[in-house]
Amino acid sequence: MIVVCPSCSARFQYDDARFQGVPRKRFRCPKCVFVFEVDNPSLAPKTVPESIPMEIPTAPIPSGPADIKQDLADSNTRETTARNDRDAMLMNAGITSGIPSGMRFSLAFLSGPQASTVRALTTAQTVIGREEGEIITNDPECSRRHCRIDIHSDATVWLVDLGSTNGTFVDGVQIFGTLQLTDRQEFVCGRSTFMLLARTVDAHGMG
């Protein structure tokens, strides 16, 4: 579920299961530290849509010996299943498998070893880390896998701390879990400061 702070309107994700059956829980906003209560959504009546199975077309198998054809068929099935499982997981989390149409996202390095550079975000999930991920900071105060940027299908952008040692900070406040970012909002990992840049683009790719 998405919890919205009534004081500063910051949005962050929270696992419904952590309510553990209690009717409501008290939250402290990770951005402005305002304390507020949220009702357990599982106790409210809701309708769950019936899932509809999807048929996956089988890729054509080239002619050849029976064992090669079977190996190709097995390989195609495994790759298709893995891809669909990943896409389904991202869709359930509200994350598109690619950048939403008509949008362009990038990160500007404001300080740190990569200062004065800009990196385009070309995938729905981008890991930032000292040694691993799509964006390598080379920052000794960053964790190996420090945080992640998630771009959802509705073009919202979410910052996820990956259990970093020194923490991830937005507006000087350490975040825990997931927090929504807006255009030109800054966040800090170690000695590195980033700014999110979100732009709409026309059919010719001009923003």
Image (tube, rainbow, N blue to C red):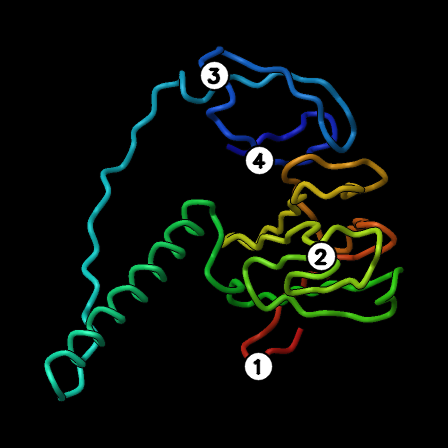
Badge 1 amino acid: His
Specify the amino acid type for callout 3: Gln
Query: Circle 4 sits on which residue?
Result: 13
Q: Distance between the residues labelled 1 and 2?
A: 33 Å
**Residue at x 65% of width, y 44% of height:** 162
Q: Is residue 145 above or below residue 77?
A: above
Foreground residue among 159 and 7: 159
Relative depth, front residue between 167 and 28: 167
- Local packing at callout 2 (Cα closer than 10 Å; few below 14, some 14-19, many 20+) is many
Circle number at residue 20: 3
Give how far apart the Cα atoms at labels 4 and 2 are. Answer: 22 Å
Residue 82 spot, x, y in % from top left = 35, 60
Q: Mark 2 points at which residue?
A: 129
Say which quarter of the image contains residue 130.
Answer: bottom right
Quarter occupied by residue 104: bottom right
Specify the amino acid type for callout 2.
Gly
* Place of residue 164 in the rendered image (x, y in percent of width and height, measured from the top left): 72, 43
Who comes first in sequence, dot 4 or dot 2? 4
